[in-house]
Amino acid sequence: MNTDNLLDEPCPIARSLTLVGDAWSMLILRDAHAGITRFDDFRKSLGIAPTMLTRRLATLTEEGLLEKRRYQERPPRDEYVLTLAGQDFLPVLFMIGGWGRKHRGGGKLTRFLDAEMGTDIEPVAVDNITGAKIGTRAIRIIKP
């Protein structure tokens, strides 16, 4: 599927999926939120081919979700740290994880805990204006 033409779509979901709509990009962002910043550590964690990882890191950097920082000059080594946009993606990852736990659960699953309370995180999407849980009220889509 050619997603290049989705960049001009008025729908923010379509635009966003052109950037983070593949599993590798989302898993890189998941690992970045867990504190991984270096190429080799991403590669080991994900079991991803180096060429694929290079492409995904370049795209996430170009699109402003990660920032490339030099941490060693000789030999030159860079790390990838989350930008504000990358940090803002964490709730999206947790909502996907919550959906997966509910509809793709079974067997051993990774747990995500609140570091202070030690309790499992149970994500819920709430409309900031009405306070209603998203999915409990009818929606309308208005195209420009």
Image: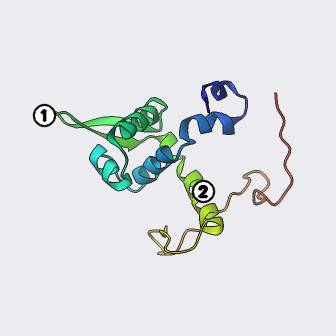
Query: Residue 18, percent across and down?
Result: 59, 34
Which one is in front, 137 or 131?
137
Q: How many marks?
A: 2
- Quadrant location of the N terminus? top right
Up-down relation of residue 129 to residue 115 (above or below): above
Label 2 sits on residue: 96
Residue 74 circle label: 1
Q: Residue at x 27, y 47 (%)?
A: 40
Identify the image quadrant of residue 52.
top left
**Residue that sits furthest to the front in the current view:** 1
The residue type indicated by label 1 comes to Arg
Specify few, some or many for label 2: CA neighbours under 10 Å numbering under 14, 14-19, or 20 or more: some
Label 2 or label 1, whichever comes before in sequence order: 1
Q: Amino acid at mark 2?
A: Ile
Q: Quadrant of the C terminus?
A: top right
Within-10-Å neighbours for mark 1: few <14, some 14–19, many 20+: few
Q: Is residue 52 above or below residue 124?
A: above
Whether residue 113 can be seen here: no
Q: Looking at the rendering, which quadrant does residue 9 occupy?
A: top right
